[in-house]
């Protein structure tokens, strides 16, 4: 597969699912042709858009699996305007020479604020009080209502979101403990705890901020819930499958836990609006939200700008910085040179073969970077003279070639 360089206005970028307008604006300003489709696509309709687009932007409802990517003959990159990339078969995309970009940190503050708000709501039983008044029932009793000041929050996962939650909690006068599988520098007065069970036993609030991996699936089940303090609270604003929901329901129903806040669920509806039984609606002091941790105007605008920037940098310079499925290469611009971008199978001899082709035309290599993953290699090479179509054709014909572009 090969691509020659062509003007920006001929690069077709399609954005689905109401990606924030900041993305379309930023990409249009760079000179690309941008089409906006305000809904998710599937089946034949998705295949047609994939086949026609150089870049495709999605949120979470459009699923780019192997059967859809089979139509991506001219696709350069995919942008996931979200924190996760579960909606894309990222390894299959890499093998087709398509980097996938996302925005892992843009919604950090929004999720952290919702977590802190949920802690306060649980401690004051605000969900129950609000629900009662919605049903015209006045209940001013103070039973079970507490301040969060002086309480202990245990954070499982101390990445960007966990760290922000810790700082906010500390500002409210809370004691902060955290556990992470990677050694992390504590912020503020937060204290690392090596053992998850020890953290659970010491915490009034246990808040989960972990990705979905084989290691985290059902990491909070009956044994962990039993270890939690009687009357304590569980918050999950990470991934639905990290909690055994049946065990959680039992711990809430028997009164061992004082409440829970859930923004994510093991299975969630695809449409934005749908009938959905979460299985906890009949239990008191359970805050339920429909996966809206990152759904603020501020977060979505930041996501739009972050992913649009990453896509532009790849198209214009070949930078794969931030790609979740590609070797990380971020070459500086080299004025008055021509740049070769070569994606190839990760086998011996590729660099020598490409260098020989360039040498045959008398071009001098000014700079080159090569990085690899298990499956693919990514070579960026700057040369001192304009390259002929023959060079492009010969590199593209190499048996290990996946995709080649020549810039400038």
Image (spheres, rainbow, N blue to C red):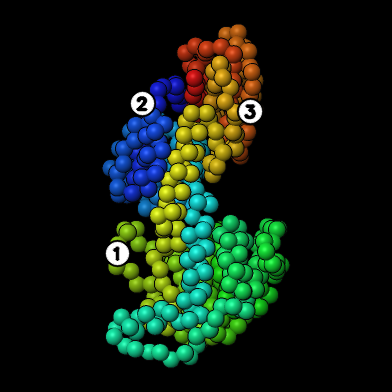
Residue 212 screen position, x and y as percent: 53, 59
Residue 76 screen position, x and y as percent: 44, 33
Quadrant showing the N terminus = top left
271 versus 23 height, above or below: below
Q: Secondary structure at mark 2?
A: helix
First of labels 1, 2 by sequence position: 2
Determine if residue 54 is in view: no
First of labels 3, 2 by sequence position: 2
In terms of image quadrants, where is residue 400?
A: top right
Between the residue at mark 1 and the residue at mark 2, the CA separation in whole angstroms equals 38 Å
Query: Which residue is at the front of the view, 316 or 344?
Result: 316
Q: Secondary structure at mark 1?
A: loop
**Residue pointed to by mark 1:** 274
Q: Which mark is residue 369?
A: 3
User: Which residue does the image show at 63% across and 28% down from the upper left?
Assistant: 369
Q: Secondary structure at mark 3?
A: strand
Determine if residue 261 is in view: yes
Query: Which residue is at the front of the view, 156 or 137?
Result: 137
Query: Which residue is at the front of the view, 58 or 391?
Result: 58
- Badges 3 and 2: C-beta atoms under 8 Å apart? no
User: Which residue does the image show at 32% across and 59% down from the upper left?
Assistant: 272
Q: Which mark is residue 10?
A: 2
Q: Residues within 10 Å of mark 3 (few under 14, many from 20)?
A: few
User: Which residue does the image show at 48% across and 44% down from the upper left?
Assistant: 306
391 versus 120 height, above or below: above
348 versus 230 height, above or below: above
Q: Of tags 1 and 2, which is closer to the observer? A: 2
First of labels 1, 3 by sequence position: 1
Between the residue at mark 3 and the residue at mark 2, the CA separation in whole angstroms equals 28 Å
């Amino acid at each position: 597969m090969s691509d020659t360089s062509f003007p920006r206005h001929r690069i077709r970028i399609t954005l689905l699912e109401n990606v924030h307008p900041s993305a379309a604006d930023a990409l249009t300003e760079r000179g690309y042709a941008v089409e906006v489709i305000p809904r998710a696509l599937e089946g034949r309709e998705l295949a047609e858009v994939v086949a026609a687009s150089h870049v495709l932007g999605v949120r979470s409802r459009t699923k780019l699996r192997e059967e859809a990517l089979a139509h991506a003959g001219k696709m350069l990159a995919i942008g996931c305007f979200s924190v996760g990339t579960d909606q894309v078969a990222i390894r299959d995309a890499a093998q087709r020479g398509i980097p996938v970009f996302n925005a892992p940190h843009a919604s950090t503050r929004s999720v952290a604020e919702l977590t802190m708000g949920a802690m306060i709501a649980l401690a004051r039983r605000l969900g129950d009080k609000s629900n009662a008044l919605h049903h015209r029932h006045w209940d001013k009793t103070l039973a079970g209502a507490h301040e969060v000041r002086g309480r202990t929050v245990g954070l499982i996962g101390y990445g960007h979101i966990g760290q922000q939650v810790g700082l906010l909690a500390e500002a409210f006068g809370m004691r902060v403990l955290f556990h992470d599988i990677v050694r992390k520098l504590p912020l503020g007065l937060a204290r690392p705890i090596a053992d998850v069970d020890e953290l659970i036993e010491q915490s009034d609030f246990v808040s989960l901020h972990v990705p979905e991996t084989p290691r985290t699936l059902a990491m909070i089940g009956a044994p962990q819930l039993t270890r939690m303090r009687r009357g304590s609270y569980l918050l999950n604003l990470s991934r639905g499958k990290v909690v055994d929901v049946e065990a959680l329901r039992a711990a809430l129903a028997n009164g061992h836990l004082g409440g829970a806040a859930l923004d994510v669920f093991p299975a969630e509806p695809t449409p934005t609006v749908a009938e959905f039984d979460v299985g906890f609606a009949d239990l008191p002091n359970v805050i339920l939200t429909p996966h809206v941790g990152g759904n603020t105007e501020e977060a979505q605008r930041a996501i739009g700008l972050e992913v649009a920037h990453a896509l532009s940098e790849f198209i214009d310079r070949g930078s794969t910085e931030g790609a979740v499925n590609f070797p990380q290469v971020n070459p500086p611009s080299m004025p008055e040179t021509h740049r070769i971008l070569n994606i190839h199978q990760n086998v011996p001899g590729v660099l020598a073969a490409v260098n020989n082709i360039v040498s045959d035309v008398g071009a001098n290599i000014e700079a080159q970077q090569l990085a690899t993953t298990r499956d693919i290699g990514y070579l960026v090479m700057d040369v001192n003279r304009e390259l002929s179509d023959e060079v492009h054709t010969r590199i593209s014909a190499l048996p290990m070639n996946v995709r080649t572009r020549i810039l400038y």
